[in-house]
Amino acid sequence: MASDKAQALMEQIRKEVAMQNFQELLTQINKKCYSKCIVKPGTKLDSSEQTCLQRCSDRYQESWNVVSNAYLRRAQKENAL
């Protein structure tokens, strides 16, 4: 029973960490891509701003994934030692 509770708690913690990571990703994408792509804020985005935002967010997500995976591999390697 205690093991089941511990596993459920660990799963809840993993979910919360994943949500925090996702929120941080969105915050960083908004901050960095907006300042890069939106030169003259207005009531709507023009096509070049939309394209820039899409490309910027795609690249940022790819970079985030590379860094996250490298970090996880390193942490797992260090824990295995």
Image: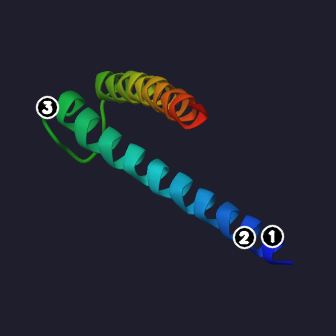
Q: Amino acid at mark 3?
A: Val
Question: Which mark's residue is nearer the viewer, 3 or 2?
Answer: 2
Nearer to me, 46 or 34: 34
Residue 58, placed above or below residue 2 = above
Q: Report the residue that reaches farthest toward the bottom.
A: 1
Q: Is residue 27 left or right of residue 10?
A: left
Asked if disc 1 and disc 2 are in contact, CB closer than 8 Å, the reply is yes
Q: Which mark is residue 3?
A: 1
Residue 53, placed above or below residue 6 = above
- Number of residues whose C-alpha sits closer than 10 Å to that of mark 2, classed few (under 14), some (14–19) or many (20 or more): few
Label 1 vs label 2: CA separation?
5 Å
In the rendering, at what x and y percent does residue 79 appear?
55, 37
Which quadrant would residue 44 be assigned to in this image? top left
Residue 16, placed above or below residue 25 = below
- Number of residues whose C-alpha sits closer than 10 Å to that of mark 3, classed few (under 14), some (14–19) or many (20 or more): few
**For the residue labelled by badge 2, is the local secondary structure a helix, a strand or a loop?**
helix
**For the residue labelled by badge 1, is the local secondary structure a helix, a strand or a loop?**
helix
Residue marked by disc 3: 39
Residue marked by disc 2: 6
Residue 44, placed above or below residue 71 = below
Question: Which mark's residue is nearer the viewer, 3 or 1?
Answer: 1
Q: Amino acid at mark 1?
A: Ser
